[in-house]
Structures are given as structure tokens and as C-alpha cells.
């Protein structure tokens, strides 16, 4: 295990795009975790000048490092505390989507028959429905039902339970090929059950694909959460980057020329999304053995297949 990790790191450290993606994601996570150490203020604190009045729409030159909003709150403080909310929603919703999608994809691909037809028809129905209108309706309806549930939890569940469909399709296509390979046939021949085959033979083969797609799905979840919060469906008591953008445009930051109000959260969303995309693409290239090898004899015997015409 340790040797595999060292080999993985040696390969990863030679990929500049992977290092860049990892750096972008890691810095955002560290900023969220160590937010109290990076600012002496709280997101609700109002900054005041020497005359005791609130510093409203103060530029970074007056109140560093990123100025204040229309209520006199510190933008830098809101940004790093907002990272906690945006990243929590993104990572949690992303993991939920990957779990549901992997479960549907493995079940449909491995068992086939009427189970495959049923699960894929459910997937097809959700695929053809536009995501944004459906999410807006679901989030608004659930919030109106007074379920005494946090608005953030509602957003997490809606994103996680709607963004698994493409993952299910992708995982199913891989499982359909894996279950026909010789090592799976041999496992069935010696009496291995479905659970054992899935755990020991199918899941290890698709795990690299799951890992890479999880990172990409996290990026999508962060973008979707930001979009919903920008449209006013976030939790105003726990500002995220999307909520900051919503407040900035509602309070005429553009009209007042307060670029420091709306530009930092927008760049933060791009920062994390770009990092996840770069990291996810590099991980898929590194962890997916299908790109360079083919399994003929079993889980541990990987034989390279030469190109057609090669001697």
C-alpha cells in the first residue's frame, strides 16, 4: 500500500496541471478550516471608522484587504467563512451524488434484465428534465413546507439526489464490460456470490473512475449551490459565495462601483471549480488502467496490448 502511494505521488508530482489543481483546491480547504486564524472578525461584525460610523462600501485602500459591503461588514471575513458553507455543500452533495450514481450504475450493469431496464428508465426520466427549473421548484417547495430543516440541508439533498444520473450511466457502461471478463467468470465458476464479486472484482476496477468523477461532481455541486444562492434560495444567516453575490447585486454594488463586493466571491468560485476540474481530469488519466492496459488474466495480472500492426 505504501509503495503504491509513493508511486502515485511520484507520477502525480510530475503533472503540472494536477499540481495546480491540487494547490487550488487545497488552499481553499485550508482557508475554510483555518478561517478564525485568518481574520479577527466575524462575518456579522460591522467595521467602524474613527468617527464611530459604519464603513459602508469602503474600498480595500480604506479597509484592507478586501474592503467592506453596504452594511460595513468585512469582505475578507465573509469570503473565508463563506468558503466553509460553499465547500461543505459542494463536497457533501458531490459525495451523495457519486454514491447514488455508483449504486445505480453497479446494480444496473451487473444484474441486467428488468433491474437494468427499471433503473435506467428512472435515470432517463431525470436526465431529460432540465436541472435548474426542477431544482428551483424542489428547493422553493420544500422550504415552503416548514419542515424545520436547514435550507443548506435542503440544497445539499436536492443537488445530491439530482446529479447522479450521468454518473450512473458512466458506471453502468464500465460494469457491463467488466462483468464479462475472465476473472469474473472464474469467480462465478468457483461459487463466489454476487456480493463477493462486486466487492472484490467489480468495485476495484471502477474505483478510479468513481474517484475522478467525484472530484468533478464536487465542482458541479459548488457551481449549482452558488447559482441557487445567487437566486435567493440560500441561507442568508450562513453566507456562502453565492449568497455574497446575491447580496452584492441586490444592494447595487455594480451601480456603486464596489467591485470588491462581487469580484472576490466570483473569483473564489472559479478558483475552486477550476481546481476540481484540473484535479479530476488528471486523476482519471492516472488511475484509469484502461488508458494503457487491459485485464486478461485477473485483477493483478495486467497485460499491455500492443497497437494493431505492432511487432
Image (cartoon, rainbow, N blue to C red):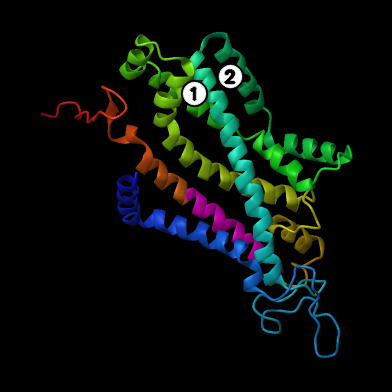
Residue drawn at x 43%, y 59% as measured from the top left: 20
Q: In which quarter of the image is the N terminus?
A: top left
Q: Which quarter of the picture shows residue 189?
A: top left
Q: Where is residue 108 in the image (x, y as percent from the top left)?
A: 53, 18
The circle on residue 120 is 2
Residue drawn at x 56%, y 63% as measured from the top left: 30
Residue drawn at x 51%, y 23% as measured from the top left: 106
Q: In the figure, 212 relative to 203: above or below?
A: below
Q: Position of residue 157 (x, y in %)?
A: 71, 38
The circle on residue 172 is 1
Magenta residues, as a range? Answer: 261-277
Describe residue 307's horizontal placement relative to residue 64 as left or right: left
**In the current view of this chain or complex, which residue is farthest to the left?**
311
Task: Look at the numbered disc 1 and give the secondary structure of its residue.
Answer: helix
- Report if residue 109 lies within the magenta region: no
Q: In the figure, 55 relative to 280: above or below?
A: below
Amino acid at each position: 500500500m505504501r509503495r503504491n502511494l509513493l508511486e502515485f505521488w511520484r507520477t502525480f508530482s510530475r503533472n503540472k496541471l494536477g499540481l495546480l489543481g491540487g494547490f487550488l483546491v487545497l488552499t481553499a480547504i485550508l482557508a475554510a478550516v483555518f478561517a478564525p486564524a485568518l481574520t479577527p472578525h466575524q462575518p456579522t461584525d460591522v467595521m467602524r471608522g474613527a468617527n464611530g460610523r459604519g464603513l459602508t462600501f469602503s474600498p480595500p485602500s480604506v479597509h484592507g484587504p478586501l474592503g467592506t459591503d453596504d452594511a460595513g461588514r468585512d469582505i475578507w471575513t465573509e469570503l473565508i467563512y463563506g468558503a466553509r458553507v460553499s465547500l461543505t455543500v459542494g463536497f457533501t452533495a458531490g459525495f451523495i451524488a457519486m454514491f447514488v450514481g455508483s449504486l445505480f450504475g453497479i446494480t444496473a450493469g451487473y444484474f441486467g434484465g428488468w433491474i437494468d431496464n427499471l433503473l435506467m428508465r428512472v435515470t432517463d426520466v431525470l436526465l431529460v428534465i432540465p436541472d435548474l427549473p426542477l431544482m428551483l421548484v424542489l428547493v422553493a417547495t420544500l422550504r415552503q413546507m416548514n419542515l424545520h430543516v436547514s435550507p443548506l440541508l435542503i440544497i445539499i439533498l436536492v443537488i445530491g439526489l439530482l446529479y447522479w444520473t450521468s454518473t450512473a450511466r458512466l458506471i453502468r457502461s464500465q460494469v457491463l464490460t467488466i462483468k464479462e471478463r475472465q476473472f469474473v467468470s472464474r469467480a462465478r465458476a468457483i461459487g463466489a456470490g454476487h456480493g463477493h464479486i462486486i466487492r472484490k472484482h467489480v468495485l476495484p476496477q471502477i474505483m478510479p473512475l468513481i474517484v475522478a468523477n467525484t472530484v468533478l461532481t464536487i465542482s458541479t455541486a459548488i457551481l449549482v449551490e452558488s447559482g441557487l444562492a445567487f437566486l435567493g434560495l440560500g441561507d442568508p444567516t450562513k453566507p456562502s459565495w453565492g449568497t455574497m453575490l446575491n447580496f452584492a447585486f441586490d444592494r447595487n454594488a455594480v451601480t456603486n462601483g464596489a467591485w470588491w463586493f462581487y469580484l472576490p466571491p466570483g473569483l473564489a468560485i472559479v478558483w475552486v471549480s477550476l481546481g476540481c476540474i484540473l484535479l479530476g481530469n488528471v486523476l482519471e488519466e492516472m488511475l484509469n488502467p484502461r488508458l494503457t492496459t487491459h485485464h486478461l488474466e485477473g485483477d493483478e495480472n495486467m497485460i499491455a496490448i500492443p497497437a494493431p500492426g505492432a511487432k
